[in-house]
Image (spheres, rainbow, N blue to C red):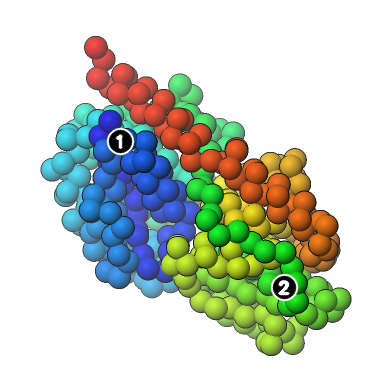
């Protein structure tokens, strides 16, 4: 099958986060399965294309601190010229001016469209999102595309916005198993936060929990990796207040490949996020055999708790800290590390995702091109 994937922004620092990581992993897995797959995406001008069938188009961001208003004019124009040459167009959609026009154009051209919203297109919206919905999103949601939902909550939210239940398909994110695996805690164990420093990710809670751990285990080191999403100043202030400058550091952004390498070098991964549909950083940690500490408010928390791949907390700094201290014990760490890698390879393996995508693509083609 010939498939076009469309993503918002491929960048050297991985600033767009999970949706682009999901897109690149799916594209690679589908190619391995024998499909002819092209990835078209916005581009920061620095990231290298990893495959000759990747098409990158220079993106422009009006504000360095956010993605509202980001455009990549060459991408929708390219989609308009080439979409009919594909069996399916799979759009990794957010409310932006890169993926929305591309999805709408492919749909208008009569090409079967599969839309994956990554939990980013919610019924709750601000003024900018409402304006985009009037022009693009609403018509797409009520149109003929098939939609992928990560969780039951996301599916229900998409239905409230006009997506017909019969066009909704539950497909989880997947992750390739890492070649390099995490090692057990020894001297100076490293606890990691690898994600955008945004309010929803709660990086300040990570620092506050680090202070409680440090009072008991002064040998433990803490690092935050990721682009600033508005919380870098608060993180640095919290670090100074707690007197942790020597043991807790924000290292700045890293590339997607760099993030996976970092995870394999740590002993624990902590993500205090709330309202997190399906965090790719957690799957990437699990794939390295890295135990995780989460809140109840992620789409993978139940699975992590079920198999013991880490500890799920209420998100308070006390519970986060207690979970870190418990998992740094050798026996607890070994059990959680084994469960983490097993969970990544079974429930979130890329072969499972490819099977699900192939089924959805076949449905999209049969509905759009009957007979």
Query: What element does badge 2 sit on?
Result: loop
Q: How dense is the environment of label 2, judged by Cα within 10 Å: few (below 14), some, or many (20 and up)? A: some
Residue 237 seen in this snapshot: yes
From what the image shows, is residue 279 above or below residue 370?
A: below
Task: Check disc 1 and report the residue beneath it.
Answer: 35
Q: Check disc 2 and report the residue beneath it.
A: 189
Residue lying furthest right in this view? 216
Residue 336 in the figure: left or right of residue 164: right
Q: Image quadrant of residue 62?
A: bottom left
Residue 103 appears in view = no
Give the residue at the far left of this rendering: 81
Label 1 sits on a secondary structure element that is loop
Residues tagged 2 and 1 counted as in contact (Cβ below 8 A) = no
Query: Quick check: 221 left or right of 157?
Result: right
Residue reaching furthest to the top? 371
Compare residues 210 and 183 and report the one nearer the observer. 183
Tell me: residue 167, above or below residue 185: above
| Residue 228 place in picture, x, y as percent | 50, 72
The tag earlier along the polypeptide, 2 or 1, is 1
Q: Quadrant of the C terminus?
A: top left
Label 2, label 1: how many angstroms apart (C-alpha)?
Answer: 42 Å
Q: Residue at x 35, y 60 (%)?
A: 10
Q: Nearer the viewer, residue 343 or 249?
A: 343
In this rendering, the count of numbered labels is: 2
Image quadrant occupied by the N terminus = top left
Q: Position of residue 170 (x, y in %)?
A: 52, 31
């Amino acid at each position: 099958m010939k498939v076009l994937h469309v993503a918002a922004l491929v960048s050297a620092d991985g600033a767009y986060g999970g949706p682009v990581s999901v897109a690149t992993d799916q594209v690679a897995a589908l190619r391995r399965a024998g499909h002819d797959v092209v990835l078209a995406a916005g581009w920061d001008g620095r990231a290298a294309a990893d495959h000759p069938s990747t098409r990158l188009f220079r993106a422009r961001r009006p504000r360095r601190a956010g993605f509202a208003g980001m455009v990549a004019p060459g991408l929708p124009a390219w989609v308009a010229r080439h979409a009919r040459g594909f069996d399916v167009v799979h759009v990794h959609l957010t409310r932006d001016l890169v993926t929305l026009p591309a999805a709408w154009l492919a749909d208008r051209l009569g090409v079967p469209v599969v839309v994956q919203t990554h939990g980013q297109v919610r019924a709750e919206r601000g003024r900018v999102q409402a304006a985009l919905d009037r022009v693009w999103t609403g018509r797409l949601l009520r149109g003929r595309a098939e939609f992928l939902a990560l969780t039951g909550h996301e599916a229900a939210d998409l239905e409230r916005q006009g997506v017909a239940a019969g066009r909704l398909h539950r497909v989880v994110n997947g992750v390739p198993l890492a070649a390099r695996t995490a090692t057990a805690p020894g001297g100076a164990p490293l606890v990691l936060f690898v994600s955008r420093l945004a309010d929803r990710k709660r990086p300040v809670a990570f620092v506050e929990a680090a202070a409680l751990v440090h009072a008991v285990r002064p040998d433990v080191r803490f690092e935050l990796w990721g682009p600033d999403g508005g919380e870098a100043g608060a993180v640095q202030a919290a670090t100074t207040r707690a007197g942790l400058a020597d043991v807790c550091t924000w290292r700045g952004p890293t590339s997607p490949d760099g993030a996976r390498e970092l995870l394999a070098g740590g002993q624990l991964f902590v993500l205090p996020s709330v309202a997190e549909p399906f965090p790719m950083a957690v799957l990437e940690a699990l794939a390295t055999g890295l135990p995780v500490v989460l809140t109840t408010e992620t789409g993978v928390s139940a699975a992590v708790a079920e198999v013991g791949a880490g500890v799920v907390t209420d998100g308070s700094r006390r519970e986060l800290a207690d979970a870190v201290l418990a998992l740094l014990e050798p026996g607890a760490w070994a059990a959680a590390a084994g469960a983490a890698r097993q969970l990544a390879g079974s429930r979130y393996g890329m072969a499972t995702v490819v099977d699900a995508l192939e089924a959805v693509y076949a449905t999209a083609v049969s509905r759009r091109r009957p007979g």
